[in-house]
Image (cartoon, rainbow, N blue to C red):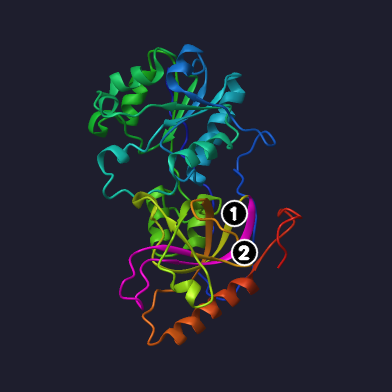
Amino acid sequence: MSSACAASSFATSSSRSMKPIRFVARPILAASFRKEYFVAPIVNASEAVERGLLSGASCAFGVFDGVHLGHRFLIDQAIETARESGGAAVALTFDVDPDELFHADRLKKLMGNERRLRALAETGADYVVVLTFTEDFAAQAPAEFLEATFGGCVPYALHVGADFRFGARAAGTVADLEAWASAGGTRICAHELKGADGRPIRATRIRLLLAEGRCEDAAALLGHPYVFDGEVRKGRGEGADMGFRTANLELPAMLQTLGEGVYAAWATVDGARYRAAMSVGAAPTFEAATATCEVNILDFSGDIYGDSIEVEPVRFLRPMIRFSSVDELIATVKGNIAWVRENLVRDSFDDADERKS
């Protein structure tokens, strides 16, 4: 007989203080690591069904954009029930965000799909099982959707958010899950994913924080820094002419989640981390400027055109401003760079051979 698990919430904290603070570089590690340095295999759903990986498993099911604290909690719960049953703990997800098929023109995401699957593999689950999401798959009625997902396998437990929806037009609800589960005895555990403030922890809420430039508050709900990567392209060249070269990043529209402004950031190039000052959005001082992401990487002079670099914005410094003169712009940018150099500090996690400040 299926059962619904108790609703749960967990504490987070955030602040918006604008006092200068010292930011420390730390590696992005999943909060729910259960096995040191363990990375779960990522398995296609059809292979998982053939191998019987879902039979008797405890599954956390969702899209998991951002792999935030709420998602980590679901996966932790799946790990706990897997320990009870002796089965595998599985993070069950899709190869793409379903909204990429239906709302790609307005979709903003916290992670690309590859990064999302890698992050799920580091949460302590035994497997990440990936469903191929297509329009035909999405068009299935709830019962057919579940049959296609599990292929006759009977999980021990299925952990979802209390507002979990599935199937054609998102018609399936937790009640439908419970009706399906009653035949095989799967436990349906629907969790209220709320923080200490009583508000739901959702990817949508985190995206809105980032759109406002609130990196610290977003990181508090993510449980890890917000990070994105982009390919370096040739830009307009004004930065180099003014004495500070920038890496101009090309980002897919759906990953342009961060609000316009200037940020203190960390940039990772070939595995080495550097302080950086980053601007997001069109530079209003230059008439020909278009929306862009430009990263001034401190103490770096290599040629990285065509390479992909990783950026971790950590602090909003100022909005984009139309300056009255180029000299005023240069003085302001130099001040931003000085703030970054003074306030972003490395710690013992950084490689000893990284460039020293």
Specify whether residue 278 is painted magenta. Answer: yes
Q: Is residue 11 depicted above or below 184 in this figure?
A: below
Number of the label disc, if any, that sits on residue 113: none
Residue that appears at 39% across and 64% down: 212
Residue that appears at 52% across and 74% down: 18
Q: Amino acid at mark 1?
A: Val
Near mark 2 (Cα within 10 A), the count class, few <14, some 14-19 or many ≥20, is few
Mark 1 and mark 2 in contact (Cβ < 8 Å)? Answer: yes
Q: How far from the left and from the top, in percent, is residue 170?
A: 27, 33
Secondary structure type for disc 2? loop
Q: Is residue 303 depicted above or below 77 in this figure?
A: below
Near mark 1 (Cα within 10 A), the count class, few <14, some 14-19 or many ≥20, is some
Q: Magenta segment, which residues?
A: 271-294
Q: Amino acid at mark 2?
A: Phe
Specify whether residue 101 is painted magenta. Answer: no
In primary-sequence order, the first of circles 2 and 1 is: 1
Q: Report whether 272 appears left or right of 352.
A: left
Q: Is residue 9 visible?
A: no
Q: Report whether 212 appears left or right of 41.
A: left
**Residue under numbered circle 1:** 269
| Label 2 to label 1: alpha-carbon separation | 9 Å
All told, the count of numbered labels is 2
Q: How far from the left and from the top, in percent, is residue 89?
A: 55, 26
Number of the label disc, if any, that sits on residue 300: 2
Quarter of the image with the C terminus is: bottom right
Q: Is residue 285 depicted above or below 78 in this figure?
A: below
Secondary structure type for disc 1? strand
Q: Is residue 230 depicted above or below 243 in this figure?
A: above
Quarter of the image with the N terminus is: top left
Residue that appears at 24% across and 23% down: 141
- Identify which residue, 3 or 293, lies in the foreground: 293
